[in-house]
Image (cartoon, grey):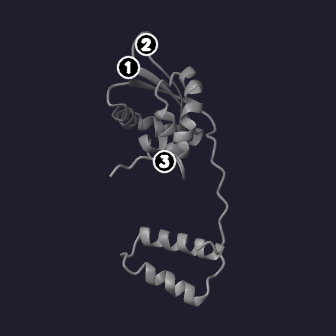
Amino acid sequence: MTNKRSGHGPRRFGDLARPLLSPALRKQGFAQNEIVTRWRDVVGALLASRSMPERLRFPQGERIDGVLFIRVESSFALEFQHLTPQILEKVNTFYGYRAVAKLVMKQGPIPRAAPRPSVTVAALPAETEAGLARSLDTLKPGPLKEALGRLGRRILADGKA
């Protein structure tokens, strides 16, 4: 049995955006754009919310010991500076070799993602809610069960089930 993707259905935004971002990122020195698109995965949620990579420069003809230029919120710059050795280690672990030898910080604002509007789901009739609960009884309590419950409520509230 193969798991070939048919091309239909939902796709990750990063997969769709990569071909569009690559030329612009390459001009900034990001031959591999994953450091930008996966910055949160590389350094963690806290550091990613307060910083963003701007460009990566390597010595001429080299692909090691580069300089990574990072924009950092002014209020977080001192703490970021103290974390430089750990950040370098995380970045180089991500690349799999010593790609970056130095970080250069530039203080400035970091663009924030617009908050997503909350979705209000109408209350389901008691019998429908009970049926949804029965269908989830085999799952142990936790985030998966809660997420499936929310999804089920939205689908049932839309009347598409």
Give neighbour class at mark 2: few <14, some 14-19, many 20+ (Cα, 10 Å): few
Image coordinates for residue 103, horizontal then vertical, percent:
45, 27
Q: Nearer the viewer, mark 2 or mark 3?
A: 3
Image position of 96 with respect to 151: above or below = above
- Residue at left 44%, top 10%? 60
- Which residue occupies the extreme top position in the image? 60
Query: Disc 1 residue type?
Result: Asp
**Residue 103 falls left or right of residue 157:** left
Quadrant in which residue 115 is drawn: bottom right
Residue 136 or residue 81, whichever sits in front: 136
Q: Which residue is mark 1?
A: 65
Residue 59 relative to residue 127: left or right: left
Residue 150 appears at what percent x and percent y? Answer: 54, 72
Residue type beneath disc 3: Ser
Q: Residues within 10 Å of mark 1 (few under 14, many from 20)?
A: some
The first of marks 2 and 1 along the sequence is 2
Of the residues under marks 2 and 3, which one precedes in the sequence?
A: 3
Q: Quadrant of residue 138?
A: bottom left
